[in-house]
Image (tube, rainbow, N blue to C red):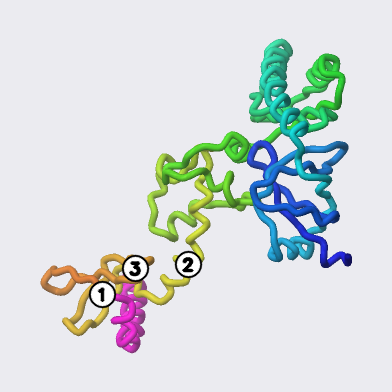
Amino acid sequence: MGENDIDVIQIELKGERTDYFLNKKGLPIKIGDYVVVQVERGRDMGKVIRTGEDLKKVTKIRPVTQEVLRRATEEDMARFEENKQKEEEARKVCEGKIIEHKLPMKLVDVEYQLDGSKITFFFTADERVDFRELVKDLAAVYKTRIELRQIGVRDEAKRLGGIGSCGRKYCCTTFLQEFEPVTLRMARDQSLSVSPTKISGACGRLMCCLAFERDYYMEVAKRLPKVGTKVKTIYGEATVTGIDIFSQVVIVEDESGGEMRLTADALKGYQGQLEDAKIESTEEEAEDEK
């Protein structure tokens, strides 16, 4: 079996974390199966969430070297559940140690590797924390490899999960693989309120979804007249008072104060008039600058 014939699968690990693995053994794996995988310095278990031809392309984006070892057995599942209980106990121990050492950090989550070869403690902090003594204490208690990993507030939301203001699960826990920069300009481009309470997610940062529709919004906006532009319609001259991007409808007000909603298709028949409107708008802006 050649390298290009090796299946790539995507699995979800604890904390809504996903990663890609090679199915070199050609195991009969389907979505929803639990599998044991080889990870750094040990083994872990996760749930298969994607398979198929489309995932073979992942190897072209970044090398996939981790492998699927086997489908999870009843013994693996029992150990996985046992580890969950151990994680709760380790959380209490670690939180006590944090208080004892008076460290300015917040413990977010604890993750046992399936084979117990490593325990990872995820935390947030406003600044760099010297946790060397904490690691020594935890290693003395658990006699295994200890890792303390500082994460950001967005990663915290991703690990803990929840329901957003839209009524659906957080995007970061469902399909987002990486966090992309989100700016206030994205909200302004979509004529949204820039009030932090309205455009911030549960993590306290700008909502990731602000970036999803911006490109479409900007592309359609290029084809529609701007608010304040004067246009000529079959009903006479009017002023654009608003636009509905997703319906591609322009809201105009005629000289008598009446409001109309015109489709973008209807305006396409007046391209010359739209060009004139752009010139008028530019002239008006020049006058305002004077």
For residue 256, side relative to residue 140 (left or right): left
In the displayed structure, 54 sits above or below 268; it is above
User: In the rendered structure, which disc, 1 or 2, sits on the residue that comes first in sequence?
Assistant: 2
At 41% from the left edge and 48% from the top edge, which residue is drawn? 194
Would you call the spot at circle 3 few (<14 residues within 10 Å), some (14-19), or many (20 or more)?
few
For residue 122, side relative to residue 231 (left or right): right
Would you call the spot at circle 2 few (<14 residues within 10 Å), some (14-19), or many (20 or more)?
few
SS assignment at label 1: strand
SS assignment at label 3: loop
Span shown in magenta: 263-288
Residue 26 location, x and y as percent?
81, 57
Residue 282 magenta: yes
Would you call the spot at circle 1 few (<14 residues within 10 Å), some (14-19), or many (20 or more)?
some
For residue 129, side relative to residue 288 (left or right): right
For residue 58, side relative to residue 16 (left or right): right
At 57% from the left edge and 48% from the top edge, which residue is drawn? 174
* Residue 247 badge: 3
Q: CA distance from mark 3 to mark 2?
A: 12 Å
SS assignment at label 2: helix
At 48% from the left edge and 39% from the top edge, which residue is drawn? 163
The residue tagged 1 is 262
